[in-house]
Image: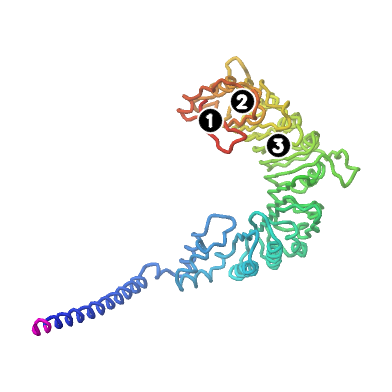
Amino acid sequence: MLQRESQLDLLRQNIAEYCRKLAEWEAQEETQATQVLVERSLLAPIRKLPPEVLARIFILCLPDAEYVPVDITTMPLLTSRICYHWREVALHTPVLWSSMALSIPSSPSLRQSLSFPNILRLWMTRSEPYPVSIRIGRTSGYSSNFILTAMHVVEVAAQYSHRWKRISLQLPSFCLSPLTQIHKSDTPILENLSLNNTAPDPTHHLATLTFLTSPSHLRELSLSNLPQTVWDIGDSFPSTQLTKLHILRGTGARCWSAYEWLKILTLVPNITECIAHIDNFPDRDPSQRPPRPIGTLELPHLCSLTLNIRGSNVLEHFLGGLVLPQLSYLEITGEDPWPQSPLQSLINRSSCSLRTAIFHAGLYDPQLFVLMPSLSRLSLSTHPSFGWLGIQPNLVPALTISPFKMPIRLPQLEELSLSGDLQFSKESLCRLIRSRWGFEPGELSCLKTIVIKPHPNCVFTRDEGSLGLEDCVKEGLELEVLDQHEDACSTQGN
């Protein structure tokens, strides 16, 4: 018995010794494995890259966006969190930090309120002395905390206005007040400015932004929902360098008249893209009712024009003297039905080749489309309150190709969208589509995309027939019939 107990104790001692050695060997293995990984990392080819090459790689990895979001999971913050060497390279590459998009929550906490201005300062310090692109926006809604935070952030941004290249502020107007302290000479390299008042307040009047009166390099300007007082139109307004001009109004707000807009356009002869909200007549100066003619105005480079008009006579006053030989994109939206005779005169006078036409709330005469032989995309819609001015039954047959009907309207048409009060049958639409389907490349283009969005109870909706275009859909026709009262849409042949 004693011998067996002695043997058992010996076995237990041996097991304990082996366990101790095993733990020691495992610790040694872990240490050696760590050393191997470190040495492999040190010997990795990327470690041998010169800092200039590594910095170039970092730059190429930046998001493909005009304004780079501030996010620890993307560049440039991501590279500064990998290792000491990468962080040093990132922090000494100013161009990595020269663009930022800062989104302020609607109800920031006290800690967040303090951090956003500091984040902006950090970016400005790291990007020095490079020109900067800054976008400051918000989520839906806002609180008193948000207002103070946003105003503080704008104040910090204004301190670096001498380095602004692109600036976009999507904030309520009362958060933009620090901009009024920027002088004419404080934005010497500004090329792109976008100000969007996201919470129009009729009781708040933003003072004139003096730095807008003579920016030397401004090429793109977008103002949305801002009072006219922010912009003093004068002879010092940027002229030859401005190529894009977007001025949009909010609901109930007033914008410039046709005469005032023409006055602006005379100062920007090289403009290529324009979005204009135009009022019927100016309220400030009764002597300008109706607008005085400004004579013929040719804009040789304008290729895209979007108009939102208020008043039935605005189109005639605005388009009456314009000559736009390069116009290829035209969009017109009216709060009232607008006549198309001024548009016909513009096309005839300009000899332009329109490729896209988007018209809302117009009086659509098929004869207009004879003047658009190069048009490839057409979208027509009617205003819900203008039911009696719906898309008339004669429009669809006029666009239907027939060997007995000349000239062919819109021979290059590839995309067609019709919405609102559609006063034509499904059978007539089917004939139009089939007459333009299946063409070989040549003088006529094949209709590829059809979008129909009928108003409830219109002729098209009440028609119990079917389109019967299943064969065309199988062959590749993109046909969408959308319900205005449902979010869901379906691609269908019936």
**Residue for badge 3:** 332
Instruction: Looking at this view, name the residue that lies furthest to the right.
Output: 287
Q: Which residues are magenta?
A: 1-6
| Disc 1 versus disc 2: nearer the observer | 2
| Disc 2 versus disc 3: nearer the observer | 2
**Residue for badge 1:** 479
Label drawn at residue 118: none
Answer with mark 3 or mark 1, whichever residue precedes in sequence: 3
Q: What's the residue at 44%, 70% (across, down)?
A: 50
Q: Dot 3, crowdedness within 10 Å: few (<14), some or many (≥20)?
A: some
Question: Which quadrant holds residue 177?
Answer: bottom right
Instruction: Looking at this view, name the residue that lies furthest to the top.
Output: 404
The answer to if 3 sits in the magenta stretch is yes
Question: Which quadrant holds residue 467?
Answer: top right
Q: Nearer the viewer, residue 149 or 317?
A: 149
Left or right side of 83 for 196: right
> Which amino acid does the dot numbered 2 rest on?
Thr
Label drawn at residue 461: 2
